[in-house]
Image (cartoon, helix red, strand yellow):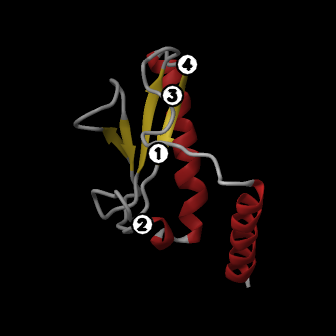
């Protein structure tokens, strides 16, 4: 289910939510993940067709900064030169290539462990 955000970034900003309650992304059952993200893609395409948007920003806060404890995706119509710049927080390069490789390795190992 999708509905307009009450405080939109741009007109047409929607929230996409599953009809059944799931607090966060980890709580969303496996059988709902594909349809949930397929609907996010459909809504982003609808913004291009229906609103003349050039694209869309999709955002999902998971636990941290999640103001409502129900998994949801923000789908925001975008237009070139609309003033929205990248992510909403400062970005910083890694201290070194070595640090980047160590972080990538830790994530890779965690993914392998979670997959079993």
Q: Which residue is mark 3?
A: 46
Q: CA distance from mark 2 to mark 3?
A: 25 Å
Residue extending furthest front? 95
> What label sits on residue 24 in the rendered view?
2
Instruction: Residue 73: give x, y in percent of width and height.
Output: 44, 48
Up the image or down, 25 lies above or below 10; here it is: below
Q: CA distance from mark 1 to mark 3?
A: 17 Å
**Element assignment for label 1:** strand
**CA neighbours of label 2 inside 10 A, class few (<14), some (14 to 19), many (20+):** some
Would residue 74 appear left or right of 55 to someone viewing this image? Answer: left
Instruction: Residue 58: give x, y in percent of width and height.
Output: 50, 41
Question: Residue 65's image quarter?
Answer: bottom left
Instruction: Residue 43: give x, y in percent of width and height.
Output: 49, 36
Give the foreground label among 1 and 3: 1
**Element assignment for label 2:** loop
Who's the residue at 50% across and 71% down the image? 26
Give the foreground label among 2 and 3: 2
The earlier-in-sequence mark between 4 and 2 is 2
């Amino acid at each position: 289910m999708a509905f307009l955000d009450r405080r939109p970034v741009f007109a047409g900003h929607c929230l996409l939510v599953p009809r059944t309650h799931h607090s966060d992304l980890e709580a969303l059952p496996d059988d709902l993940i594909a349809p949930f993200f397929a609907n996010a893609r459909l809504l982003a395409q609808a913004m291009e067709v229906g609103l003349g948007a050039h694209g869309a920003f999709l955002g999902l806060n998971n636990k941290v900064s999640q103001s409502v404890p129900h998994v949801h995706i923000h789908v925001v119509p975008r237009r070139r030169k609309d003033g929205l710049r990248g992510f909403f927080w400062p970005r910083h390069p890694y201290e070194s290539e070595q640090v980047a490789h160590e972080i990538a390795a830790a994530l890779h190992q965690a993914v392998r462990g979670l997959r079993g």
